[in-house]
Image (cartoon, rainbow, N blue to C red):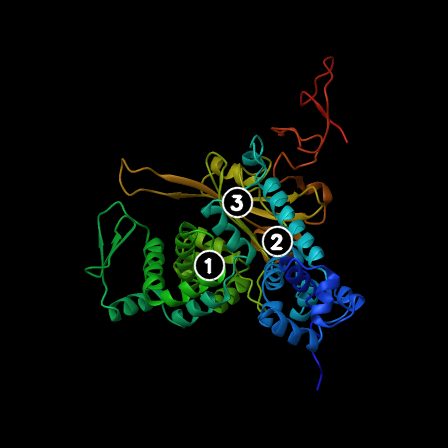
Amino acid sequence: MKVHKFYAGAKLRETRVRLELTQKAFAEKLDVSLPYLNQMENNNRPVSTGVVLALAKEFGFDVTELSSGETERLIADMREALGDPVFGEADPPLADLRLTASNAPALARAFLELHRAYRQAHERLASLDEALGREDSRVRASPWEEVRDFFHYCDNYVDAIDRAAERFAGAGDPASAATTALDRLGVTVKTAEQSAIRGYDPATRALVLSDRAAPATRRFQLLHQVALLAQNDLLEATLDLARFQTDEARAIAKIGLANYFAGAALLPYSRFLETARRMRHDLEALAHAFGASIEQVAHRLSTLQRPGAKGIPFFFVRVDQAGTITKRHSATRLQFARFGGACPLWNVHQAFETPGRFIRQLAETPDGIRYFCLARDVQKPGGSFRAPVRRYAIGLGCEVKHAGDLVYADGMDLTNPRAFEPIGISCRICERRNCHQRSVPPLERRLRVDHDLRGTLPYEIGD
């Protein structure tokens, strides 16, 4: 039988210091030599059975504490840190983490501090407009940002909820399945003239949908209510795993997960993926086939990341008329600035100028990656003359190597490097020197100012 070597030098040293004993006195109490104790405290030798018994006999020490305290916290913290997507598929076995925490706790703490600094630096780079000018260096994510990060770091795909939604939809009409499920729960459903898109009264178990909402919206809201009522245990279990820091973040995330279920039920994974491939990702045709909106279809395409059955890695974004990004999901290498607007050279801004039309663009980011980008405006009328109309533009795209699978890429010169327009992520982290639309200088570049020369910009960007 393999004997487990027990290293607990840090805890052994901590115990001696707490007892206010020198190494020599402690070694005498434990009936070991001074060099042997020194080797155990430095994790060069395992803690012997005799030492464990002596600790219990001489000091009444609970030997189970040797494997708890700081060591266990370090192990838990390292496992959590290694769950960060930046480490990819790295998944060191628990035994390796235990050895590191026991043999080299200072190194473990340094690793955790480095990871914390990385996350803060990443946050600052991704939210420069908010971080600049802030007196303190700590960046605290809001509940909304925390939820956005949750979906971002799971690639906007939640397997358990996606599969549950697919089972719920079956091969029939999801809206009919939703009505049946709500009826079984004793919920009455009706439409009425109201400003709220959806209203549910738990006391009377009555669900009221606005008759002003588009049919696709009403179908989606039916499925959203099913998620909240019939799938509540699944939603709560997923929220438990996510470990949100605040109740507000958890509450926001529950709405997001219910929306996820609704979208996945309205557009069931396998059926939707097969149809999307067959229709070459024609958004209008897919919307008609599934009774969904163009925005719902575009959003769903960005979530098709099921292991073993992945669709094209798409990015999906929605911007308002001010250029502020209100939704962002990316299964590609292209990421978006967390705050502020998208690059003004990106075609998503032009969609407001040509309502009802799809705009195509071949684009290249500063890292040399080339993308096929599609943009279109979407309008959400309020249903009456005085009700405000919400206007957005949506963008959908993929790396150009997948463009041949999209009907929208037909006729475009995908092999001509000059056909690709340069775009960026955020002016503050974009290093293009000659961009005519640059709004602010890049953060980490020096500027040269010549009072006798004026180019496109009032400065030149140095190295």
Disc 1 crowd rating (10 Å Cα; few below 14, some 14-19, many 20+) is many
Tags 1 and 2 touching, CB below 8 Å: no
Which residue carries the number 3 mark?
375
Work out which residue is located at the far bottom of the displayed protein and give it. 1
Identified by mark 1, the residue type is: Leu
Work out which residue is located at the far left of the displayed protein and give it. 204
Residue drawn at (64%, 62%) of the image: 15
Q: Which mark is residue 152?
A: none
Residue drawn at (47%, 68%) of the image: 160
Spot occupied by residue 456 in the image (x, y as percentages of width and height): 67, 23
Identify the mark nearer the N-term, 1 or 2: 1
Q: Secondary structure at mark 2?
A: loop
Spot occupied by residue 71 in the image (x, y as percentages of width and height): 63, 63
Give the number of marks. 3
Q: Quadrant of residue 48?
A: bottom right
Spot occupied by residue 13 in the image (x, y as percentages of width and height): 68, 61
Which residue carries the number 2 mark?
332
Residue mark closest to the camera, 3 vs 2: 2
Q: Taking the image as drawn, is residue 357 in sight?
A: no
Q: Tell me: 396 left or right of 26.
A: left
Residue mark closest to the camera, 1 vs 2: 2
Q: Quadrant of residue 432?
A: top right
Identify the mark nearer the N-term, 3 or 1: 1
